Amino acid sequence: MQGKMKVCVLTGKRKLEWAEREIPQPGPGELQIKLEYVGICGSDLHFYQEGRLANWELDGPLALGHEPGGVVSAVGEGVEGFKVGDKVAIEPAVPCGKCEDCRQGHYNLCKDV
């Protein structure tokens, strides 16, 4: 899939705007996903209402919704186990696995996600 996509971004406290962005193409080891569903959860509401979540402050446009599912629309070089048309759910938080929080099993608190 190539071209442009529309994205609703949070640009400030309680301020949403539509933006147009290039559709990123997958590089080696990457997939391109055509999103079909995106969940909005409590952390998204905190960013919208307060412009922050705990110690993380909004410092630029942010596309809310980090619990997506969709269909593989392109496969980068070297990817195995996925093909165009596969349905996928995405876990966007990839913890470092090395910090104290990660070593204690608190991956959701990793500051290097």
Image (cartoon, helix red, strand yellow):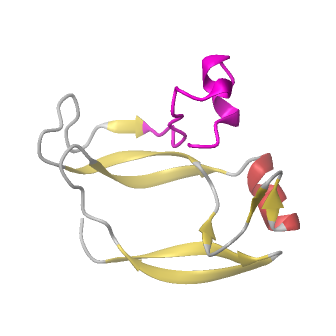
Q: Is residue 110 magenta?
A: yes
Q: Is residue 70 magenta?
A: no
Up-down: is 43 above or below 13?
above
Q: Quadrant of the N terminus?
A: bottom left
Up-down: is 8 above or below 104?
below
Judged from this view, the residue extending furthest toward the top is: 104
Up-down: is 51 above or below 54?
below
Q: Say which of 110 and 79 sits in front.
A: 110
Q: Quadrant of the C terminus?
A: top right
Judged from this view, the residue extending furthest toward the left is: 77
x, y (%) of residue 27? 21, 55
x, y (%) of residue 69? 48, 44
x, y (%) of residue 86? 29, 37
Predominant secondary structure in magenta? loop
* Picture residue at 80% right of the left edge, 62% below the top: 52
* Picture residue at 35% right of the left edge, 46% below the top: 71
x, y (%) of residue 7? 53, 73
Q: Which residues are magenta?
A: 89-113
Position of 47 with respect to 9 (left or right) is right
Q: Say which of 39 and 15 sits in front.
A: 15
* Picture residue at 12% right of the left edge, 46% below the top: 77
How many marks are shown on the rendered structure?
Answer: 0
* Picture residue at 69% right of the left edge, 24% below the top: 106
Up-down: is 44 above or below 63?
above
Picture quadrant where residue 18 is located? bottom right
